[in-house]
Image: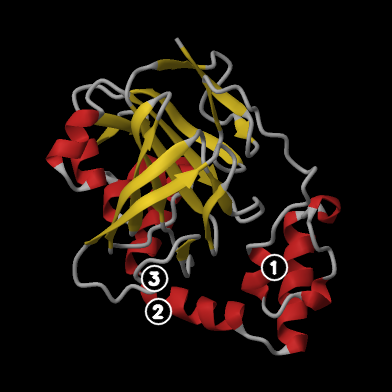
Amino acid sequence: MGMNIKLHLSVNIQRLLPKHFLSKLTGVLAESQKVWLKNFLILSFIKIYKIDMSEVENPNINSYKSFNEFFTRRLSEDARECDLNNLSITSPVDGSISQIGQIHKNKILQAKGINYSVERLVGCKEVAQTFNEGKFATIYLSPSNYHRVHAPCDSKLIKTCYFPGNIYSVNKKTCQIIPDLFTRNERLVCYLRSPNFGDFCLIFVGAMLVRGIETVWKQPEISTRDFPQYNIFQEKNLLFKKGEEIGCFKYGSTVILLFIPKFQWLENLASGTNLLVGERIALRD
């Protein structure tokens, strides 16, 4: 009972906090190019989160202009191995599985006893119907994780929809308390098409202290929260090979995958399973 009270208390504190202001303040610090400040932030971050600098493409902290530049650091070419089987789906990120499974009657499992609507998540009834009885995976990125997002299979970008929203934390505790968490938070829905798996969505979900969701293609700026409503962006012939970079977060957050039912998730995957970019997570039937 005491643990449950603490859980509700921590979430209620989040509700009261000026989350957008705190994110803007964090962004100012994270983008600062004052050498003493950005080096202090980087060194403190490495120590607190035990960052493995041996897998970083550029381990020289003095070469990073800001903390954010370090936070979105690239990994060395041999740090991750991508499963190249054309009939497999790979993890788009380093992170841990929050929930994984089947979509039932347009509902996705958020936490035990809590479901949310696919239609509200993607903002379109027609798109939601595409994934009726399909499959989903929700992958949480902690601050310590590598924060670039990669294509889980060969695909073509069809369109993106950006939705402004709240910026609650997306950790396990918050998922257990706040209903419709992922449909409340800021997010970028990327609608893609794969020759082997059909249409799918890869969704960037923002969270507390996230100062930006960035993509590798040119599109309206989405690293601030000044949009009064969602916008739709379409790009012709933007192709990704499995494992190629799609975008990045500027702090810990979540990626949600939605697929039509053409495959099976690997049996060993469950809530809490740690994943690495390029690791096989599904195989086509």
- For the residue pair 226 and 252, the one nearer the viewer reads as 226
- Disc 3: which residue: 19
Residue 164 visible in this rendered orientation of the protein: yes
Q: Left or right of 2: which side holds 279? A: right
| Residue displayed at 52% across by 23% down | 270
How busy is the neighbourhood of tag 2: few (under 14 within 10 Å), some, or many (20 plus)?
few
Secondary-structure class at tag 3: helix
Q: Amino acid at mark 1?
A: Phe
| Residue displayed at 55% across by 23% down | 86
Image quadrant where residue 232 sits: bottom left
Secondary-structure class at tag 2: helix
- For the residue pair 174 and 55, the one nearer the viewer reads as 55
Give residue 21's mark. 2
Which residue is situated farthest in the top direction here? 285
Q: Amino acid at mark 3?
A: Lys
Look at the numbered discs 3 and 2 and tell me whether their residues touch, using CB distance below 8 Å.
yes
Across and down, in percent, residue 148 comes to 58, 53
Q: Left or right of 2: which side holds 135? A: left
Residue 2 visible in this rendered orientation of the protein: no
How busy is the neighbourhood of tag 3: few (under 14 within 10 Å), some, or many (20 plus)?
some
- Disc 1: which residue: 70
Which tag is nearer the camera, tag 2 or tag 1? Answer: 1
